[in-house]
Image (cartoon, grey):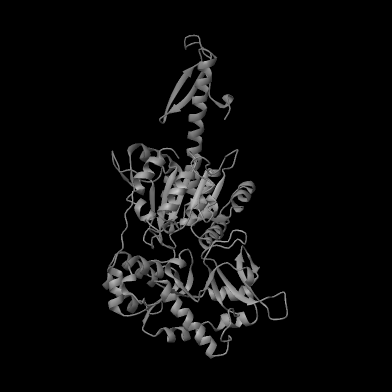
Amino acid sequence: MDIDDIPQDQSESYGGHKKIIYGTHGGHYQAATSSGWADEAYATALAVHELDAQTEAARAAELLAEWFAQAGSEGQQAAAALALLQNFILISGGPGTGKTTTVAKLLALLCQGRERLPRIALAAPTGKAAAHMARALHKALAGFSLSDGLKRHLSALEGQTVHRLLKLRPPQMQPQFDADNPLPLDILIIDEASMLDLALMLNLLRAVPDGCRVILLGDENQLPSVGAGAVLASLAQTTILDGETAGRLKTLLPQRENPFQTASNPPALSANTARLTVSHRFGEHSGLGCLARAVCAGDAETAWAQFDRFPDQLSVRTASVEQLAADFCRQQADYWQAADHADIAAAFDCQSHLAVLAARRDDAARFNLACRNHLQRYGRIPANAQWFAGQVIMIERNDYPLGLFNGDIGLILRDTDGGDGTLAAYFPDGGTYRKIPLSRLPAYETAFAMTVHKSQGSEYRDVWLLPPADAESLNRALLYTAITRAREKFTFVGGRHAFAAACNRNETRRSGLRDMLADKTERI
């Protein structure tokens, strides 16, 4: 906005001063006279700032109404509006509640009308989750109209691990970015925030520059990190706004009643949480959704009843590990056919159809060994082969030069560039696949089955949850996380007693993160 855009009065009725500059303050118009260059400059700056803010809010209100006009998107709209008012926001919600869609539209709102587009980073605790977020974000952005320049800016965003963002390198694991050398960012988005441990979160907070917006995405009911702390669960709380924030929210949502509670003295950070509760994937008639909600509530009886209510989506079975491995290999016939033909795209597609999850690494390792033994009996792999066509592997250690990260899934297939049957490892790389010589692979493990922890950030058509050797290792958060990895069908391997015990077993962790972050948010 320019000074010439501001209404002015040339009358002599203001003590002989010629210039009257109108601005707003707290939603009310006011006038300032120019008694000299200093006063005039101050008054002009005030008016420009206030009128720009008013114009920006009005435009944001229009876009919020336009972009969240669909039925069932009221929660997403409220979350995006609240996020516009806060430099720190946690958006929590289960699968299919629209976290990525909300953030995509929020980013577009934050970029609208900016002469200088903000510096944005997308990150997640694992490479797999980071790549998934970037793909989902790009897909969501393609769904609504943006200027060409803004579309290019946002489409260029790539996901990365938090370790890579901070440049945490072994063995000392000291970050390159910290309080003395903050990240060169205006907006930071962290997906799958439930996987953050306390140490990693603190490193992030130290590296965030003053004024940077921090947006955490995740599901507070999922498993906490393997490391210390339960970051998401510690921060998430009932949303309560003070009067000023509620008033500012009203300017963004003029046609709606305040969707949040209001209090004169709300708890610290209570205005920094927005929950998405409407699942567009798991509705009230979804067996997976009903099961997940009952487990989340700790209602074991209602949860178990869903297996009879939705037999096409939910099942229970008991079987030995050897029987399960044989069934798994038989059901993966399409995958083995793709592997035999070295059809990389088809193999990766088929591999994502069925996931076998375990509570602990030992449980996953037993299943993987049973699969190997089954495949050896049927002559698919030699007895002592280190690698074989169709082997699913998971990277165990970050390798920055290769661009491979802990949790990345790869497939061992015949080298498509050679005709001698040589094997190579293939990994997804954007819309294509990257070949890595087997001799260059970092530490890995066979991953026909994986732990529930390692599955976070991924989705599969069908999911089997194996019985743990140690019943105490199966708890509510683990059970909920396993269920919500499935898109179509979930199978619990075990009996009713084990299921109920897991549903009733709730692990809690405490930390002082909320208090530490409350102080930090006053500056970011």
User: Where is residue 289 shown, x and y percent of the image?
Assistant: 38, 68
Q: Quadrant of residue 490?
A: bottom left
Camera-side residue: 275 or 75?
Answer: 275
User: Where is residue 495 shown, x and y percent of the image?
Assistant: 31, 80
Question: How many numbered marks, from 0 up?
Answer: 0
**Is residue 29 rendered to the left or right of residue 305?**
right
Looking at the image, can residue 259 be seen? Answer: no
Q: Extreme top residue here? A: 16
Looking at the image, can residue 61 be seen? Answer: yes
Q: Quadrant of residue 344?
A: bottom right
**Is residue 160 rendered to the left or right of residue 302?**
right
The answer to whether residue 126 is above or below residue 310 is above
Q: Extreme bottom residue here? A: 378
The answer to whether residue 181 is above or below residue 141 is above
Camera-side residue: 106 or 327?
Answer: 327
Q: Extreme front residue here? A: 171
**Is residue 419 rendered to the left or right of residue 101?**
right
Q: Quadrant of residue 472?
A: bottom left
Camera-side residue: 481 or 1?
Answer: 481
User: Where is residue 52 shown, x and y percent of the image?
Assistant: 51, 32
Q: Quadrant of the N terminus?
A: top right
Q: Quadrant of the C terminus?
A: top left
The answer to whether residue 207 is above or below residue 130 is above
Q: Residue at x 46, y 67 (%)?
A: 454
Q: Residue at x 27, y 68 (%)?
A: 504
User: Where is residue 295 shown, x and y percent of the image?
Assistant: 32, 68
Q: Residue at x 73, y 80 (%)?
A: 419
